[in-house]
Amino acid sequence: MTIAAVERTGLLGKLIDAEQERFKTLHPRSAAAWQEGGRNFLYGGPSHWMRRWAGGFPIYVDEADGAHIRDIDGRDYIDFCLGDTGGMCGHAPEAVTEAALCQLKRGTTMMLPTEDSLWVGAELSRRFGPKYWTLTTSATDANRAAIRIARMITGRRKVLVFSGCYHGGVEEAHVEIRDGRVGMRNMIHPNGVDHDAVTRVIEFNDVAALEAALAHGDAACVLAEPLMTNFGMIPAAPDFHRTLRDLTRRAGVVLVIDETHTLSCGPGGYTAENGLESDIIVAGKAIAGGIPAGVFGLSRETAERLWTLVPHVNPRERQSAHLGFGGTLAGNALTIATMRAVLEKVLTPANYQRMIATATDLADSIRELIAANRLPWHVTQIGARAEIMFMPRQPRSGADVIAGRQPDLETLLHAFYMNEGILVTPFHTMLLMCPATSAHDVERHTAVFVEFIDLLRRAGVI
Ligand SMILES: Cc1ncc(COP(=O)(O)O)c(C=O)c1O
């Protein structure tokens, strides 16, 4: 079944308008709060990301608990967005809340370690492979630090990334290939940074392009998610990671694997599930249960290269050697306490098993509906995370997503979902499970997805 392209824009536009009107009617208090916020916040809310929801404005949260959010209009939502991953532990998980309360009473940020940090360091190495770790306040910061270190130890400037990637507020990665040209990533406004000077961008899974890019000899690092999660979901082709590792090693290029989103795969992320080897590994978001935190870990070899520039422990060098990135609040006692609670009590093997089983049920139910209705869509599941994409096959690269993506259909689905009490990540259709996501939540999602298909059919879109 195909969807008629010409008619689609008009029809979908009308349906989106209708859903946004319904959204306004259902959310008078959030609408008023949004108006008020616009008077003092640069982009309406405390973060510019909060304006990206498909209803036209965000719901204002009264309370969040487990897999559910209640807004100030008294409406309840099943939250499959989970703070775009930061809430993967579920909202207000007891173990994290208790650890936070306990630590808050004993001091939050002293720029000194607590003993809990010893447990956390050992656990990070146990999960992700032996590494030398540093904490940051976000995954963005962890990526920036990884890039800085890669430049220090290689003496090279460029960061090699894959088109369609997102690694947070990392300037070097704000690029993509569109119509054969390199430009700013979709929807990021240019700011005068000369990406030619600092970045190489190629398509994911393109080994020939990778070889050619590395042959220039100017890349300090490859910065990559193990599979791409920020442009819909783009799986790695079989053997791509082995090739990526071989080629970067041969070229003396630092391989940075960003596991921030792929923590959904299991206790040690995609890396542990698939035996990846990286020089630097990065994670963040969910890792401290929603308390701002990132981590990056260096392999022994990478750490030793760095230590030749900035000595490991040398009291005489105390004032002269530092790494050139910030983070006064990084690794503070509160973060460490909550990270310990997450790793010890929330993101446990048993909870992963549960989350992944729930995601499998959800993905299977959508797949069945897609097949039964002969729709040209697909679902990809990676651990506790599922992605609905309005294209017939899994993309192999950013170019495939650009060619096949249907942004209006995504907007309509998201607005419809919100009106029916379901939240998904606003940037693409990602549904994430937390330990508290229940079979009932999945059933409700399936029922709403059926209603969405009916809506499209009644409107003549499909
Ligand atoms: C893969 C990946 N890395 C890093 C980041 C940055 O995370 P944060 O915005 O929490 O710094 C993101 C954000 O979405 C991400 O998707």
Image (tube, rainbow, N blue to C red):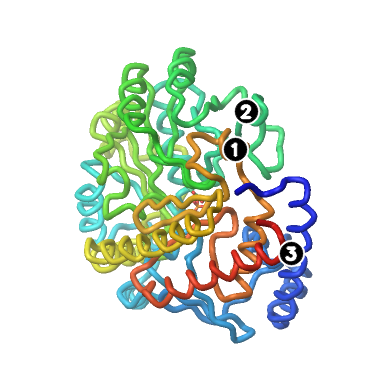
Q: Nearer the viewer, residue 446 or 436?
A: 446
Which residue type does callout 2 highlight? His
Q: Select label 3 or label 1 by which is in front.
A: 3
Q: Position of residue 82 (x, y in %)?
A: 47, 65
Mark sitting on residue 40: none
Q: Position of residue 375 (x, y in %)?
A: 55, 53
Position of 26 relative to 185 (above/below) = below
Q: Earlier in the sequence, mark 1 or mark 2?
A: 1
- The residue where tag 3 is placed is 15
Judge from the rendering whether residue 287 lies leftward or rightward of residue 185; answer left or right: left
Which residue type does callout 3 highlight? Leu
Q: Quadrant of residue 35?
A: bottom right
Q: Position of residue 430 (x, y in %)?
A: 50, 57
Gap between marks 1 and 2 measured at Cα: 9 Å
Position of 39 relative to 8 (above/below) = below
Judge from the rendering whether residue 189 lies leftward or rightward of residue 330; answer left or right: right
What crowding class fits label 1: few (fewer than 14 Cα within 10 Å), some (14-19), or many (20 or more)?
many
Mark sitting on residue 174: 1
Which residue type does callout 1 highlight? His
Instruction: Quarter of the image for the C terminus: give it.
Output: bottom right
Mark sitting on residue 195: 2
Q: Select label 3 or label 2 by which is in front.
A: 3
Q: Are marks 1 and 2 in contact (CB under 8 Å)?
A: yes
> Does dot 2 land on a helix, a strand or a loop?
helix
What crowding class fits label 3: few (fewer than 14 Cα within 10 Å), some (14-19), or many (20 or more)?
many
Q: What residue is drawn where x is 73% and y is 82%?
A: 28
Q: Earlier in the sequence, mark 3 or mark 2?
A: 3
Q: What residue is drawn where x is 62% and y is 62%?
A: 413
Gap between marks 3 and 2 measured at Cα: 39 Å
Position of 134 relative to 196 (above/below) = below
